[in-house]
Amino acid sequence: MTVKKNILIIIIFIATVLSLFINKLTTPRVLSTNELLINGLFLFEQPKSISDFTFFSGTDDEFKKSDLLGKWTLIYFGFTRCPDECPTTMYQMSKLIKVLDEKEFPLENKQWVLISIDPERDNSIDIDQYAKGFDKRFIGAVGSRPMLINVATQLSVNNVMPDKDSSDHSHLDNHVNNIILMDPNGNFAGVFRPPFDISRLSLTYQSVTQD
């Protein structure tokens, strides 16, 4: 009886050690602030609050600051007619989602948003369809130019009023190719800076957003 009991204790011990080992291998490592910076993420020591906003997605569904609450959100500012930077970055973000899926990383409280910096030509349906072309979980949204400038300025994204000449789109040349990180409190938490390498992006994202 004693022998069986000892064997059972040993089996439980081995199973516990093995479980802890596997958990350590599968749980993303928490990176230091310096490691995050080296890997492309500038994380604020104190997240910054932003004012309320209203954008529109799809068939004019509202997307507001309240939609950020309870979720880690990546926001990218781009436009449907962007020739290279936007589709490249959106593709990298879609690869991030795929990698997270493969790792079975929890995504219930995660979301990805594309906000148009060309509201004069992008409508809510076009920008949402464009975003979902990279991954169906993307949200594409657009708002008025003043609303865009207000939010973009708070999130350190350069944006200016277009020239009165409707054929001049040179204002889009000031496009900043950063990915904005918002925390579950709806605050501006940090900035992912290019170039975007999927391994580094995945490493930093998991480190910061793991539950």
Image: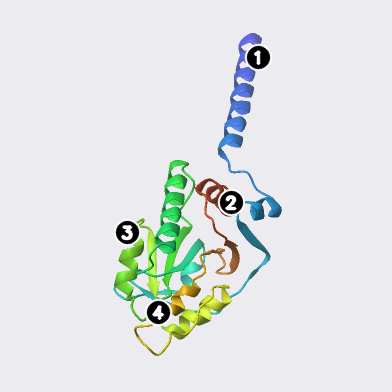
* Residue type, numbered disc 2: Thr
* Residue type, numbered disc 1: Asn
Label 2 sits on residue: 204
Judge left or right: residue 10 versus residue 173.
right
- How busy is the neighbourhood of tag 4: few (under 14 within 10 Å), some, or many (20 plus)? few
Label 4 sits on residue: 169
Label 3 sits on residue: 133
Label 1 sits on residue: 6
First in sequence: mark 1 vs mark 4: 1
First in sequence: mark 2 vs mark 1: 1
* Residue type, numbered disc 4: His
| Residue shown at 52% from the left, 69% from the top | 176
- Mark nearest the camera among 3 and 1 is 3
| Residue shown at 64% from the left, 53% from the top | 36
Query: Label 2, label 1: how many angstroms apart (C-alpha)?
Result: 44 Å
Query: Label 2, label 3: how many angstroms apart (C-alpha)?
Result: 25 Å
Residue situated in front as seen by the camera: 96 or 103: 96
